[in-house]
Image (cartoon, helix red, strand yellow):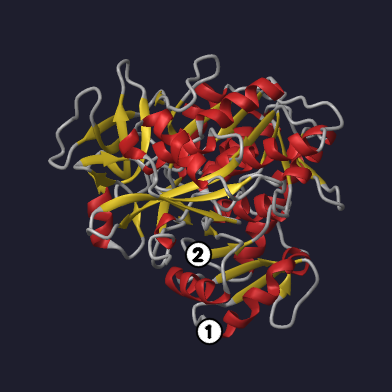
Amino acid sequence: MSNNAALYFVDRHLSEGRADKTAFVEADGRKRSLTYGALAQQTSQFAGALTRAGIRREERMAMIVVDELEFPIAFWGALKAGVVPIPLNTLLSTDVYRDIVNDSRATVLMVSAVLWETVAPIVQDIPSLTHVIVVGDTKDGATSFDDFIHGAKELATTEAKADELAFWLYSSGSTGLPKGVRHLHENLQATSDTFGAQVLGIRETDVVYSAAKLFFAYGLGNGMSFPMSVGATTILWASRPTPADTFDILTTHRPTIFCGVPTLFAAMLAHAEKSPIEGEIAVRLCTSAGEALPREVGEKWQRQFASEIVDGVGSTEMLHIFLSNAPGNIQYGTSGVAVPGYELRVVDENDNDVEVGGIGELLVNGPSSAESYWNRREKSKATFQGYWTRTGDKYEKLEGGRLVYCGRTDDMFKVSGIWLSPFEVEQALVEHPSVLEAAVVPYRDKDGLEKPRAFVVLKDGERADCVDTLKDFVKDRIGKWKYPRKVDIVTDLPKTATGKIQRFKLRDVD
């Protein structure tokens, strides 16, 4: 029996009577849509086109593709052909694309036309490439997507084992070249059987909109694995998800599940304060990941829009969320408990489990763990240790098993000899009504001692002369020794495409 993931997520829906059910719909001006039946046919045709082009099983296809219909067609079509798709961040620079595609040794490069100017300069610099496909108007040196598949015969889905390599994702990485994370066919269903089914409770009648894009792990689950596991419908939006555009999608297309990130939820709340929302929102449940959700943001969203935000923790290495709050059992300010199907440990520097109230690194054991990093033997051994995967995140263990995010292992620092969590200070700052976002890093004072320094983004219209007020606010909230000794008012914070604050970029700011 074949365990090719495309059989479960695509082909199965035909025999179960969902051929005419809408799988994907674009929310932009094109307003195209794709049924499950059309998806099955076009993925098989794309698989046939890859085979016709001489692309062999286990060869790799890099995808620099925005959220549009051709993304799921190419991703699942590659799996059907036994070719390995590698979705890449669509916000990177030309030089980074050159390094990543060379690192992957991809044979095929697929690019959205809107990104062609960024990608075109690298095409001649990658010796492994034999085919370049552009979604949209034909470009010099490339074949259009339509021409590539034109006349190709539909290919039967290739047999594959459950533990066979299926696709790669490149980790966002805080420094250096992102790492190629290699995932198996079984990992996709593992996430939909755990978080998708047992926490999110996704149903065939749901309509899902994920502001988080398909190119990274969180968005791939939100927008493809979870809805396709039950035959639900996904709304695709190719552009950057601004608060105004997101509210328009929520009121016009009326998704029942909305998947965002903390920075977007905060920005949407600030937008709603200035501009009343026109139209009804039908969202029954929201999810958040990428970075811990501040308590104030979660509570305010639920009061204003009457939908809970299920805040969870996942990683590229584990493919999706393994630690989470749950509907009806949410404690904002915490990351919740282990998702059913996963085991968690919080360990000290000697890998001993910490006691309640202690802080340590989070380790996870579960069915969606990646096989390895590509060409990173030492890093693979350090991260994937038997059944356990090291997350590199620090957590505090509470009574009852809930965990509270404290920061990356390299973000933590000591003040007055006591470990300080940047996130705890950041959460206190964003509870102030003038603050939109905050990031906290260490700096050395005149005595050479590490102290907290905060970079703060204020809401529109707020005065910038509130530094002393913010310091006192933090003292009252979490303790006098934890307050930021310096507060810098800035217009924005450096972030990854997944919404994670890049604190390391703030450490050397003068």
Above or below, 229 against 112 in this view is: above
For residue 491, the mark is none
Classify 10 Å Cα crowding around label 1: few (below 14), some (14-19), many (20 and above).
Answer: few
Q: Tell me what residue is drawn at x 61 percent, y 61 percent.
A: 90
Please give left or right for residue 69 compared with residue 340 in the image. right
Q: Tell me what residue is drawn at x 50 percent, y 70 percent.
A: 106
Classify 10 Å Cα crowding around label 2: few (below 14), some (14-19), many (20 and above).
Answer: many
Q: Where does the C terminus fall, quadrant-wise?
A: bottom left
Q: Position of residue 253 (x, y in %)?
A: 81, 35
* Labels 2 & 1 near each other (Cβ < 8 A): no
- What residue is shown with label 2? 60
User: Considering the numbered disc 2 on the image, is that residue within a helix, a strand or a loop?
Assistant: strand
Image quarter of residue 197: top right
- Of 397 and 443, nearer the camera is 443
Q: Position of residue 453 (x, y in %)?
A: 40, 51
Image quarter of residue 129: bottom right
The reply to whether residue 460 is in sight is yes
- First in residue order: circle 2 vs circle 1: 2
Please give left or right for residue 202 compared with residue 70 in the image. left
The reply to whether residue 157 is in sight is no
Q: Position of residue 205 (x, y in %)?
A: 72, 23
- What residue is shown with label 1? 125
Q: Which amino acid type is marked by label 2?
A: Arg
Above or below, 53 against 167 in this view is: below
